[in-house]
Each structure stands twice: as C-alpha cells, then as structure tokens.
Image (cartoon, rainbow, N blue to C red):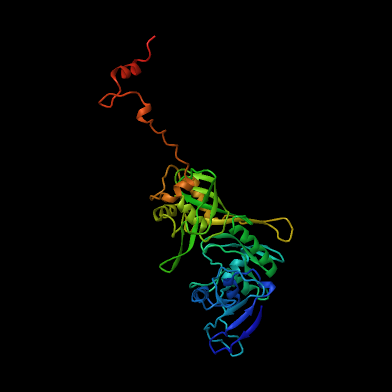
C-alpha cells in the first residue's frame, strides 16, 4: 500500500490519506483494510464512517463488503484519536490487552506453521475489538507477536467456541479468502462443521435447509438476522449425533454458505433453536437446560478443512468439545429421561415448504354431472339405481 497524497494532520486527528492498493492487498474487503490502516479505532466507528460515505473507493461511496483490486485508490478519512502518551509516539490508540487474555489464547493454540495459526477460541471472547470491547482474539495475538502481520481469515460469534484461522502471510490470506468466496457462492470452498444442541427431538433426519438471510437488519441498534426472501442465499446441512429423549438433540451442522448467525437462525427457523441462544432461542428452554449445567450458547466449531491453495492436499483441523459442554452432555445422558422441552416454539410459516415433507396430493376432482348417473328432480339418483349399487349385481 503506497500513499498517493495526504493532507497535513491535525493534532488529534489522523490525516486524510489516499492509499493505492498494491498486489499484496488485492482481494481484501474494504472494512478489513480500513481496520488495518486505522489500528486501534473501534469497528463501530469504522462502520459509521462507511455508512456516512466518508470512505471512498476510486472516488465513489463504498460498503465494507466490497473487495479492493490492485491499483484502486482508497480514501481514508481523518479520524479523531486519543492523544499520545509521549510526544514521540504516533497518534494511534493502542488497544488495551490484558496479560490474562494473551495467556488464555496462547494455551488455546491448536496449530502453528509458517502460514497459519489455528486457535480453539473460547466462548465469551470476541474475535476482534469494537462495540465496547477493547480487545479480542486478533488484538491479543498481535500484542503477543508484534513483529508479525496477523489477519483473521474468518470470524466466529463471540459466544461460539472452536476452530478459528489466523493468517500469518498476506498471500495466505488472499488464497483462503478466495476459498471463502466460493463458500459464499455455495460452492463449498471450506468444510466447516459445528456441534449444536437444539430444542426437542429432531425428526427431520439429515436435512439441508435453504432459507435466504437478511443480515442488515438492526433492532434497537443491535444486528438481527432474519429469514427473508430478499436476503442472501444461505444453506445449512443438519444431521443427528445423539438424541436426549424428547428434550434435546445434539446435531452436527455443516455450513454450505457462511452468513452471520446462520446456524442459529436456521435452527430456530426449523423449530429447534440452539440451547442457550438468548437472541433467537427459547427463554423457557434455556432456563430448563440450566438445570443440566448449561451456562452458555451450545454451539462449537469442531472442525474445519479445505484443499490447500498451495497444492499440499487436504488440510484439516479439529477442536474438542469444551469441558463445560461435555458436562452438559453427560448430565443430559443420565437425566433427560422423558422430559419434554419447556416453551412452545414452532417453525415459521415459510419454513413449512422448506423443512417439512410435501403434503399428499389432493383428491381427484368430481366428475361433471353430465358424466354421472342420471338424477331425478330432487337431484338424487333414481331409487332403482341406488338399490342396485347397494345390493350389487344380480346373479
């Protein structure tokens, strides 16, 4: 990335910059590139800049999802920052990262090579800072490895645990993002599988749910995802791992596309919300599962695999189910019995055509009166005809 021009910076603001996209950054999303160019600025503020049209790509307004190409010019607007601690320090606010978070993520490292870090992300930790969160996984890893250029390959919800990929090279990031674009198009560049405990007995067998999702809806300032015909294509494949009577079912879910909150919304849409889901789930069922020790969302990214873009064959990583979720499974196995799930969740009307078997064909239409037996003035068949039908033919 090279500067095409800039204004003189003010005391408490970053300068206006026009950054020319180089080959190393080609294919990166605008919001991710902006976050790297403005380190320490909360993501909520970056999204506000995008919504206001202050960020421009080749002179035009742009959304965060757009991917840049080599030679594009990105206008980076001025941003007010906190004053530096010392006069010789740059005017960039460095996220506060606790030693405890750094140690926790160091212990959660599943794999490391020259291209990738694979983290078994604990539940309750965001993948990045923003929205009142000073630091997440990526900030903590950068604090522990200041000499490296680390970038998130994909994301997990804050309350979801499991496999998270972090690229150590820009070339690796671009290659894996190309695979993710295939996934978003439904071509399955990645094979990502999750374990989810859902409400009730799943009687749909192995089921692929295709329901488009709108991810741009905000309720009370909070992002909410809904099934909507105008949304983006979304497909999830559910299969049963273990039943716990009528109370709950442990499912493996394979993501065929990668939309925000996809598994949680599709599961609720099917009438089987994920246990512990406070946004799309059933509050009564969540309270019932607390008796079995559940204190978090029961959603875990247990495996991820893909064809190595460098031609090294299939690459696979897996993360074991966390101990607190294992304890819930053990408790359910020994005590679920004949319990029924609390609450009353039913599939939405639109989901009937997606997840329920087709209804039997309607009865054949009645024959026109002209083709039926002759009838009298009363509209009934003559007595002799009715008697013959009742008695049957004479022999």
Determine if residue 106 is in view: yes
Which quarter shows the C terminus? top left
Q: In the figure, 68 relative to 198: above or below?
A: below
What residue do we see at 41% from left, 54% from top?
A: 282
Q: Which residue reaches farthest right?
A: 311
Quarter of the image for residue 374 reads top left
Q: Residue furthest top?
A: 395
The foreground one among 376 and 356 is 376
Q: Quadrant of residue 144?
A: bottom right
Residue closest to the eye, 258 or 385: 385
Question: Toward the viewer: 282 or 212?
Answer: 212
**x and y percent of residue 307 in the render?**
69, 56
| Residue 102 picture quarter | bottom right
Looking at the figure, which quarter contains the N terminus? bottom right
Q: Picture coordinates of residue 221 (x, y %)?
A: 43, 69
Task: Farthest residue to the left: give it.
Answer: 378
Q: Nearer the viewer, residue 224 or 202?
A: 224
Residue 330 percent across, percent down from the top left: 52, 49
Residue 322 in sight from this viewpoint = no
Q: Is residue 34 above or below residue 305?
A: below
Residue 287 location (% of width, % of height): 41, 55
| Residue most extreme to the front | 370
Q: Residue at 40% of width from left, 33% of height from top?
A: 365
Q: Is residue 6 above or below residue 224?
A: below
Left or right: residue 145 compared with residue 194 = right
Left or right: 304, with 200 as reference point: right
Q: Tell me if residue 228 comes above or below residue 333 in the rendering.
A: below
């Amino acid at each position: 990335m090279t500067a095409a021009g800039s204004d003189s910076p003010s005391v408490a603001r970053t300068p206006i910059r026009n950054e020319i996209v180089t080959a190393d950054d080609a294919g990166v999303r605008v919001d991710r590139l902006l976050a790297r160019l403005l380190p320490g600025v909360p993501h909520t503020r970056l999204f506000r800049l995008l919504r206001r049209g202050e960020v421009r790509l080749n002179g035009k307004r742009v959304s965060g999802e757009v991917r840049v190409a080599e030679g594009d010019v990105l206008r980076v607007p001025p941003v007010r920052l906190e004053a530096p601690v010392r006069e010789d320090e740059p005017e960039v606010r460095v996220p506060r990262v606790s030693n405890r978070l750094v140690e926790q993520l160091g212990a959660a490292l599943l794999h490391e090579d020259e291209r990738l870090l694979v983290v078994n992300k604990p539940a309750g930790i965001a993948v990045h800072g923003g929205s009142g969160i000073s630091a997440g996984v990526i900030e903590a890893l950068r604090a522990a490895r200041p000499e490296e250029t680390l970038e998130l390959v994909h994301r997990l919800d804050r309350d979801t645990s499991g496999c998270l990929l972090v690229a150590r090279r820009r070339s690796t990031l671009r290659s894996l993002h190309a695979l993710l674009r295939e996934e978003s198009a439904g071509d399955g560049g990645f094979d990502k599988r999750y374990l989810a405990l859902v409400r009730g007995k799943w009687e749909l067998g192995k089921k692929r749910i295709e329901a488009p999702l709108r991810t741009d809806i905000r309720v009370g300032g909070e992002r909410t995802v809904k099934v909507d015909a105008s949304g983006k294509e979304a497909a999830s494949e559910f299969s049963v791992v273990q039943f716990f009577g009528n109370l709950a079912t442990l499912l493996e879910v394979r993501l065929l596309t990668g939309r925000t909150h996809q598994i949680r919304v599709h599961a609720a849409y099917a009438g089987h919300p994920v246990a512990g889901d406070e946004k799309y789930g059933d509050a009564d069922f969540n309270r019932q599962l607390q008796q079995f020790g559940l204190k978090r969302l029961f959603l875990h990214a247990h495996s991820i695999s893909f064809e190595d873009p460098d031609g090294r064959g299939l690459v696979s990583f897996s993360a074991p189910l966390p101990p607190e979720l294992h304890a819930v499974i053990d408790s359910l196995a020994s005590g679920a019995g004949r319990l029924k799930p609390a609450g009353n969740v039913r599939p939405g009307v639109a989901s009937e055509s997606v997840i329920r078997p087709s209804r039997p064909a309607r009865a054949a239409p009645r024959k026109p009166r002209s083709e039926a037996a002759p009838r009298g003035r009363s509209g009934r068949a003559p007595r002799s005809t009715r008697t013959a039908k009742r008695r049957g033919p004479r022999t």
